Amino acid sequence: MTQPDTVLDRRRAGLLLHPTSLPGPGSCGRLGPDAYWFVDFLRDAGFGVWQTLPLGPTHDGGSPYQSLSVHAGDPRLVSRALLVQWGWLPGLSPEAAEAAGDDVLGAAWDGFREHADAPARAEFDAFCEHNAHWLEDFALFQALRDVYEGKPWTQWPRGRRDRTPKALARVRRELADAVERIRFVQFLFRRQWRLLRAYANERGILLLGDLPIFASHDSAEVWAHRDYFALDDQGRPLTVAGVPPDYFSATGQLWGNPHYRWDVMQADGFRWWVERVAGQRELFDLIRIDHFRGFEAYWEVAADAPDATNGRWVKAPGEALFRTLRERLGPHLPLVAEDLGLITPEVEALRARFGFPGMKILQFAFDGSTDNPYLPHRHRENCVVYTGTHDNNTSLGWFEELTEERKYAVRDYLAHPSDPMPWPLVRWAFASVARLTVVPLQDVLGLDAAHRMNRPGTTEGNWTWRFGWDWFPQDVAQRMHHLIRIYGREPASG
């Protein structure tokens, strides 16, 4: 068997928080001062990993897992205060810039063209050149999407929908200014993220990202690379992705993403995937691959199905893909496999063959069976243990919804009857033999079900949760640092 990768080389503690959940005056959290203060909190509390959700630009529903691009960053995350600091928003205070609408990014483009120095201009040019393999298509896609007021690309005029050379040449002429501005906004995102990552790394904190297995149908990559996806001649999905009924939903989850034409991708040397994973490695130190089981076999549902109940499993070339990624990107891929859901021996064998760490969710552990693989005494070193993820209830909310009998069983196992929930669960997560423990911020703050990030199978009220700095108990950093220290998860010194 292939020797395991060394991505989990020592015991660490991580915290799960998407940047949109950071506080601040804007419509969502951003990569400005609050993000840096959050890194300082992580350092003071002894954490060594910050896990986020996918960072791409979202559709109206706000789901990070349905992005307009697998490469681009979310413009909402761009800190306006930093643009003022860089001199590209003259005449605005940081407070006024943060409170302004999205048009302020266009003003920053004007300010950049007028005030940027030669090194900044060279940095922008280098960014555009390095990322041209995806940036050109995304900028065209987003410019056209703005023209058509957010309509999916399948509803655009045929020439633009089908990317005929004549239509694209005309778009490049007519929308040149918009295309250049969109490139610039992506440059801002990457520049700010790079600076934040450097700040975190200097303080001993690794960034753990999230790579969804599927691309959104209404995305730049599906529009630009239709041959890689199972679509009809008008660009509509022939079948769509999802999962059968599970813990989260009695009718399964119907995601709606088009399936890959894996034979075409494999014949092309998986170039699309190599570029995608390489791009994520430029953003993160570690990468969680969402829905890992889909690389062994995926759930295929008819495009017009009302839910995901009826479908079929179709084999995928996961072994060939990961072998190629290792050959092209190096032997130690920094990947964590989200191996939840219906996991077969074949899926487990694929994960083990490449040594990828899997995941353990403590909220799944207490079904009454002592053989439950999520129970702490069943954990292994090469895995990541969570109290819960973005798809789960908060641990306090989860516990409050259990029956009295189940609550007793949980407390009996955790053996800390006097501590209020969720602290016994958090303590056991840190005590686990797993090399990495990740706890959502909601559990660190002891928040109830009203503060959960997502409810799978629903479309309303998700992805909008934000915290406030005044929610932090005065001793929370010290309390977390104590748990992290006694269970050997402190960041390495120096």
Image (spheres, rainbow, N blue to C red):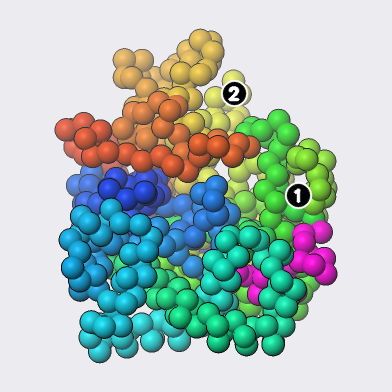
Percent position of residue 323, x then y: 64, 71
Residue ID at (17%, 61%): 93
Amino acid at the residue labelled 2: Asp
| Mark in front: 1 vs 2 | 1
Numbered label attached to residue 367? 2
From this view, report whether residue 465 is shown above or below residue 296: above
Q: Which portion, as a residue range, is magenta? A: 220-238
Q: Residues within 10 Å of mark 2 (few under 14, many from 20)?
A: some
Q: Is residue 178 left or right of residue 219?
A: left
Q: Is residue 395 left or right of residue 91?
A: right
Residue ID at (27%, 56%): 98
Given residues 329 and 169, the one toward you in this image is 169
Percent position of residue 335, x then y: 51, 60
Q: Is residue 317 left or right of residue 368?
A: right
Residue ID at (23%, 82%): 115
Q: Is residue 45 left or right of residue 28?
A: left
Q: Residues within 10 Å of mark 1 (few under 14, many from 20)?
A: many
Q: Earlier in the sequence, mark 1 or mark 2?
A: 1
Amino acid at the residue labelled 1: Trp
Numbered label attached to residue 299? 1
